[in-house]
Image: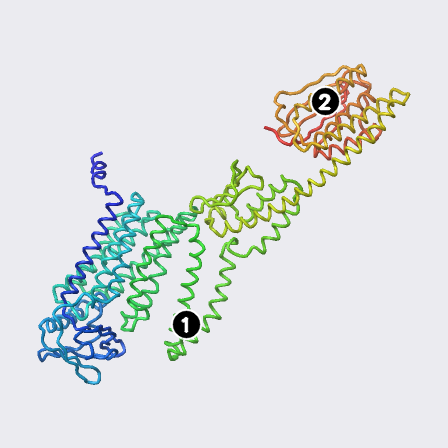
Amino acid sequence: MVVADWREKLALSPASVMLLTLLFIVLTQGAAVYTLLQQPWTGLRLEPDTASGFVRVVAVDPGSPADGNIPVSVILTSLTVADEKIPLTSNLFMYAFLQQNYRTYEISLNHQVNINQGLVSGKLLTLTDQNNQQYVLIPQRQTPLHSIPVYFWVFLATFSIIPLLSAFVWSYKPNTRGVAFLFFAGVGCYGFHFVGTLNFAKEFFFDRQITEFLLIVELVFLNIYIPSIFTLMSLYPHKLFPYKFLVVFLALHSFYSVNFYFSWFALPEYYLALQSVVPFGFGLIASQIQVKRSLHDPIERTVSRIIQLSMTLPFVPIILLHILPIAFGQEPWLNKNFAQILGGTSFIGLAIGILRFRLFEVEYWWFKSWLWLLGGCVVVLVDLLLIGLLNTPQLYALGLSVVLTGFLYFPLRQWLLGKWMPLENQSLQDFLALFSTSLAAADSSEAFEQGWQALLQARFAPQHLTRQVATLTQPQLEGNGLSLRVPALTSAAVYQLSGKQMASRLFNKADVKTVTALLDIARMARNASDAREQAVREERERLLHDLNATVGAKLRRLADDLPEAEHREATEDALQALDATVKLSLQADPFSLQAHLQAWQVEIAHRTAAAAVQLDWQVDDGLQQGELSSKQALELTQFLREAVTNALKHAQPSRLTVRFAREAGSLQVSISNDGKIQPPDTWQAGTGMSGMAARMRTLHGEWHIQHLAPQGYVRLDALIPLLRYE
């Protein structure tokens, strides 16, 4: 409780975190500008020239002591002040952590201090180029503000985004595991690149105190930056290693930096190469473990892939094309300014992964980015092989590597796209065949709806597909792509698809576009089918009305003219059948089973009373909620009528029992009588029995007749599926 109280007291609001971060940035940048303004000014902008081993003049500030005195692009080899000649080798302008070891750095530092003292003294400086031509100038004691290079301001502004972005993520999700380490990494990255930018913006060199202070600051921020990134990758989204392991990693990493400065032990050289490559390798292993741990959660897996990609895409080119060439004494293929900015872009991906912002768009680009990285690595590898093994000139090697890559990489890329890319990110051409076949087979609104649901299932293979009562006009994503809501073809229902490809992927915008197009086609097909059904229904209604008006009138006149009562009764039965057929055929809505049970009871009771037969009518409880379609109602009515007619006509019973019961989702009908009992296999097949069999086939039901001689009756049993039962 006490610890919780202290946490609440020490907790900072999101605005406070952002304000403190901004204050830190302003103070550090103010100190950097002040330091630059206090340096002597010659107006020269120098860069190391690897080919010559000296420095090249890349720019001269207008109005400076060197303006009009030293031309641009000249290579300077030495600087002489007070009769002391100091060589201007390219190693002097190399960052401290890029030196082979601290001993070589100390030699460079002594030369830097001597040059700085000569500049500060205000004495004449003599600069010598490769042709032994000398240039004399007197530096000004302070640097004017306008002479600070533009890239200094651009880089500071760019790198300021990193801690601000990290602070925003921390303040937005303060309780997320490992998110604090993103903030520490952002501060460390800013501090590391801030010192590098300050060193890059100076003309020559600072004095010893400032140089060593900046080196210590740079090492401190580097030891915050790299371990924090590794810790973040080890904790988010899953905790992979115990905290003790992370503490040991931090201690070893920091010890290596401290030993670089104090040189206690003889350790492997090339500080930055080992200090960055080894943790980067461990980070890649951790990121791959995170991906494997998240296989059953599409959101967590996408987050892991974003973090993995955020570290891989920037730092693989930086290590291969910048750090390693410098470590082996070669000219880097990647400019240091671009390398710094490229490294900072990793925080954008880390922030997206932690905030889980629009994850549904990341999965597709994750795969594309790996293909892009693969293509770049193939070009570099082929180029190195041509130069190193075949001694091909660089110009020809570059051209041949591009040509060979075209034959190797692009077929491989197409094969990978066809094998690993999800079906929904490819063309719909193959799927449209199944789509059109499914819709063409639908002959009713229910069939269209069932077909639409089956198509969604086949297209996306969701882990869960549920139908909900809701109103939705267009498909939409939910839960960062975890679910996709799709309107049903009816207006009052929505399908909720969760866990695409059996929870192995996230839904994305491409899925929304795809399902929107399919939905439009399905709606057009259903509307066309509805219009066709409406036309057929209207024509059927007209024909049925004409049939009832003509045939019914003739049957009525025939019944009135027939002399025999039996014939008149048969004609009346035909009239009832015709009237029921017309009425039931014209109604499209489902019929209540309860209402039909009452109508059947009235009709059968009337017929048994006329035949002097006792009726035993039995209906089990719970049959009130059943429904029949118009076709079921018509066929079942005729089936019961023919069954009762056969019993009354041929068996001449004294008692007729009709029983209705429920069996699962079906209606069970039993009709028995105690009349003349003969085995069913001796019955003569006629139109009555064949008609009843045909109707049962239409109802998709089952029926059979039992001769129960010991009990003294014959029983007909039928089982008919109901349209709906609740």
Identify residue type, mark 1: Val
Note whether 714 is above or below 52 in the view shown. Answer: above
The image position of residue 251, as x and y in percent, is 21, 54
- For marks 1 and 2 on the same chain, the one whose residue lies earlier in the sequence: 1
The image position of residue 623, as x and y in percent, is 63, 23
**Residue 600, labelled with which disc?**
2
**Residue 382, labelled with which disc?**
1
Asked if labels 2 and 1 touch by Cβ distance under 8 angstroms, the answer is: no
Residue positioned most to the front: 63
The secondary structure type at the circle numbered 2 is helix
The secondary structure type at the circle numbered 1 is helix
- Which image quarter is the N terminus in? top left
Q: Nearer the viewer, mark 1 or mark 2?
A: 2
Q: Quadrant of residue 307?
A: bottom left
In the image shown, does 147 or 76 lie closer to the viewer? Answer: 147
Q: CA separation, marks 1 and 2?
A: 87 Å
Answer with left or right where residue 109 lies relative to residue 594. left
The image position of residue 45, as x and y in percent, is 22, 72
Note whether 181 is above or below 139 in the view shown. Answer: above
- Which image quarter is the C terminus in? top right
- The color scheme shown is rainbow
Local packing at callout 1 (Cα closer than 10 Å; few below 14, some 14-19, many 20+) is some
Identify residue type, mark 2: Trp
Residue positioned most to the right: 563
